[in-house]
Amino acid sequence: MEDNTQGFSPEDFGLDSKAVAETSTPDQSAIPKFHDDSPMSKIDLSRMKMVLDVPLKVTVELGRTKLLVNDLLQLGQGSVIELDKMAGEPMEIYINDKLVAMGEVVVVNEKFGVRLTDVMSGLGIEDVPPPDAV
């Protein structure tokens, strides 16, 4: 599998590498607290450590369009494809094809990045199986 993180460092995104290193191993105070009636309250968070190194596919969608095959065949170098989004409109950020946030384009050291402007709440909570099903 290809390593897409190669070449990036915390400094590329205006972050202090020391602060990132300190936050990469969460302490108990950083673990969110859930209400007793929420599905997440029944999960043993110490067992979740095993999934922290699982790679995820992150996709940022700039926009979409539909083309006829004839129009596709007419494309060449310098062609412009008009997308359905307006300039400055928030972009969708997907993790493993699930919408998780909205953001805006930023440029950091001549590379594109995305600043998150809105993170969806309650991600995946409805997908958590009950503890007796595990």
Image (cartoon, helix red, strand yellow):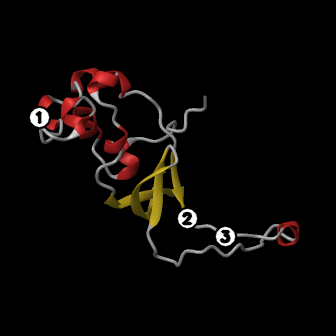
Amino acid found under the numbered disc labelled 2? Leu
Amino acid found under the numbered disc labelled 1? Ser
Say if mark 1 contacts mark 2, CB within 8 Å. Answer: no
Tell me the CA gap for discs 3 and 1: 45 Å
Residue positioned 23% across, 36% down in the render: 40
* Residue designated by label 3: 65
Image quadrant of residue 46? top left
93 shown above or below 11: below
Mark number, residue 62: 2
Image quadrant of residue 121? bottom left
Mark 3 crowd level (few <14, some 14–19, many ≥20, 10 Å Cα): few
Outermost residue to the bottom? 86
Of 14 and 129, the residue lying toward us: 129
- The first of marks 3 and 1 along the sequence is 1
Say if mark 2 contacts mark 3, CB within 8 Å. Answer: no
* Residue designated by label 1: 29
Tell me the CA gap for discs 2 and 3: 11 Å
Q: How far across and how far down the image is residue 108, in percent?
A: 44, 57
Mark 2 crowd level (few <14, some 14–19, many ≥20, 10 Å Cα): some
Q: How far across and how far down the image is residue 30, in percent?
A: 16, 37
Q: How far across and how far down the image is residue 70, in percent?
A: 88, 71
Tell me the CA gap for discs 1 and 2: 36 Å
- The first of marks 1 and 2 along the sequence is 1
SS category of the residue bearing label 3: loop
Image quadrant of residue 106? bottom left
Amino acid found under the numbered disc labelled 3? Thr
